[in-house]
Amino acid sequence: MLRVTDEMMLSAALYNLRRNSRKLFRLQVMAASGKRILAPSDDPLGAIKVIDYNSQLSRFEQYQRNIAFGLSWLQRTEGVLQDLEELVSRAHEIAVSQSSGTADAQSRASCAGIVREIKAQVWQLSNASLGGRYLFAGLKNDQPPYAEDGSYQEEEDASYQEFQISVGQGVRVAVSLVGPEVFSFGSTDLFQELEELAQALENDQPDLIAQKLDTLDQALRQLINARAKVGARVERLESYKGILEGSALKVKERLSEIEDADIAEVITELATREAVYQASLLATRRLLEENLVSLMG
């Protein structure tokens, strides 16, 4: 039968063994993770700061994803505007050549078909999309903004409101152009002007063809202005992107100062704790063997 003293010694030895085991395990986790705060109780104030900094980083990451999407949207828009500019320039060239005295009814009729093809391509581009969202539909971008007759959707005010993205706390940037900004000018629009040009070509009306030169010039200026607006927005998003990257770097540095462990110090303490644990384990084993012999005797 074990004496009270023996029981107390054995109990103390087992307690120390468990305590050393827990400390050793904690150091092993710290060495593997590189973190010194493994639970809020390790550093309550530091844990609160870690949560706050991680929350900031999560917001920054969302803003960065928004900016990446916005830049993709603007890049797609820029490509469409460039294609539109080339189409309108082609129509302008046709108007110049077919308004001259060297053109005849046959050449004009032939060019009418080309202009109508240009108009069809313009309509396709007016309904260009990215990821299922239509570029020129404003906030109501889940459906095509232009019908085949060239009419723009007019349901609700959302049709004329720009699609925006959040790039910071309380900061939003418009990335879309609504249809009229691109295709309408004055009291007319590009679809109407191309149709009237095609009709003037079909009807062999050089004077009316010449009149379309001014409106096509307006359409080109409209597209140039739209491209300039897109370029300015790209620059703005790139600027916010740089600001976010800098802010995220600073927060990560602060987070590292609070959360990261001194690996060299941890490894040194780990080696010491392993030695202590092995010694404790050996002492407990001997104590158990001695008490086992006592019981058998």
Image (spheres, rainbow, N blue to C red):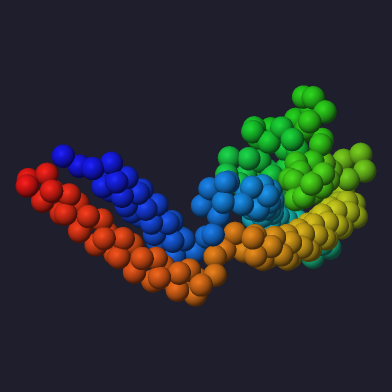
Residue depicted at 83% across the width and 56% down the height: 229
Determine which quarter of the picture holds residue 84. Answer: bottom right
Residue at x 38% of width, y 56% of height: 20
Which quarter shows the N terminus? top left
Q: Vertical placement of 49 versus 253: above or below?
A: above
Quadrant housing residue 170:
top right
State the residue lying farthest toward the left: 297
In the shown orientation, is residue 12 left or right of residue 242? left
- Looking at the image, residue 211 sits to the left or right of residue 121; the answer is right
In the image, residue 219 sits, relative to residue 282, either above or below, namely above
Write down the quadrant of residue 123 in the picture: top right
Q: Is residue 33 left or right of residue 37?
A: left
Residue occupying the far right of the picture: 186
Rendered position, 174 above or below 233: above
Q: Residue at x 44, y 65 (%)?
A: 31
Q: Can the viewer see residue 124 in this picture?
A: no
Q: Is residue 244 visible?
A: yes
Count of all numbered marks drawn on residues in the image? 0
Please state the horizontal and vertical placement of residue 23, each as a whole percent of the image: 42, 56
- Residue 174 is situated, as x and y percent measured from the top left of the image, at 79, 47
Comparing 180 with 217, the one in front is: 180
**Between residues 130 and 90, which one lies in front from this camera angle?**
130
Counting from the top left corner in percent of width and height, residue 179 is at 78, 41
Which of the two residues, 127 or 59, is positioned nearer the viewer here? 59
